[in-house]
Amino acid sequence: MSRRLPWALDARADAPFPPAETALRDPDGLLAIGGDLSPVRLLNAYAGGIFPWFSEGQPLLWWSPDPRMVFRTDGVRLSSRFRRSVRGSDWVVRADTCFAEVIAACASTPRPGQEGTWITGQMQAAYIDLHALGYAHSVEVFSADRLVGGIYGVAIGRMFFGESMFSAASGGSKVALAGLAQRLRQWGWPLIDAQVENDHLLSMGAEHWPRARFLQVVREQVGAGGAPGSGTQAFGTFGAAALA
């Protein structure tokens, strides 16, 4: 019996993706191969519950795993000990003031069990383009003028698709994620896509959702909400102590 191969994408940037439900089981979630990282293709992918993930030297690979790792925006957990540590902190949280620096930091931060990074120069350039169009956003944590943590992702409608986060000081990424979740919850956004499982995400309250349930929420939320644009003013600035 021949093994099914991932869908080969059409060269046209606006060509549709195959349904996420048709992704392979092994490797879990591999759906399609090829194409490009143009804004049109990336936005079509995210709106369909699909994301790019590949390493340097590989072709472009597109994924929609089952189950999906997600955070409910009211479900991000910070330990009591960590909350105590940020109560007296001078850290502040803001958004979209240094997107390029956040994605570069995510790309250069060492990850346990990983060699190199999947956030290639090509990926960074593609998401910087999306940021300029008002779809890709960063949440940043500062101590005075020092960037100590951050997270970036893609927002369509009222759905936030998280891509990566980093810490330059212990707990920086936790504050970025918790700050993002708090603001999204206040806006009525229900979910943050976290893509695939890792122990750190699970420790902060991430959940496994069947892909069908995830896709249903995505379809509901990408058509809601306002127009794309900078999130700096709407997000505002607040102290990390407010998360304690």
Image (cartoon, helix red, strand yellow):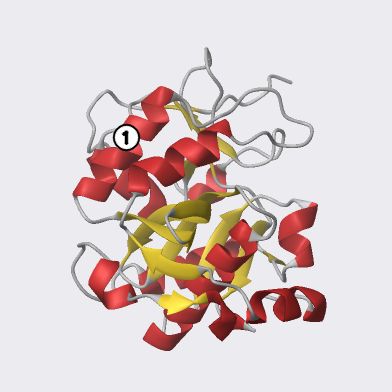
Which residue is found at the position 59% from the left and 67% from the top?
175
| 208 left or right of 21 in image | right
Amino acid found under the numbered disc labelled 1: Ala
Position of residue 209 measured from the top left corner of the image (x, y, whole percent): 67, 66
Give above or below for 97 relative to 224: above
Q: Position of residue 179 (x, y in %)?
A: 51, 73
The quarter of the picture where residue 68 lies is bottom right
Query: For this rendering, which residue is in front, 187 or 67?
Result: 187
> Which residue lies at the image location 56% right of the left edge and 47% below the top edge?
64
What residue appears at the point 69 percent right and 57 percent down from the top-left corner?
67
Horizontally, residue 188 falls left or right of residue 224, namely right
Evaluate whether residue 166 shows in this view: yes
Q: Which residue is more in the foreground, 201 or 78? A: 78
Number of on-image labels: 1
Give the residue number, with chain letter if any, for mark 1. 126
Q: Secondary structure at mark 1?
A: helix
Q: Position of residue 228 (x, y in %)?
A: 21, 63
- Residue 224 shows in this picture: no
Q: Is residue 82 above or below residue 41?
A: below
Q: Is 15 or 54 nearer to us in this picture?
A: 54
Horizontal side of residue 178 vs 40, given as left or right:
right
At x 44%, y 41%, the residue is 103
Q: Is residue 58 above or below residue 81?
A: above
Within 10 Å of disc 1 (Cα), the crowding (few <14, some 14-19, many 20+) is some
Task: Determine whether, in the image, residue 224 is placed left or right of residue 76.
Answer: left
Residue 104's place in the image compared with 190, above or below, is above
Quarter holding the C terminus is bottom right
Tell me the quarter of the image containing the N terminus.
top right
List x then y, in percent, for residue 13.
24, 32
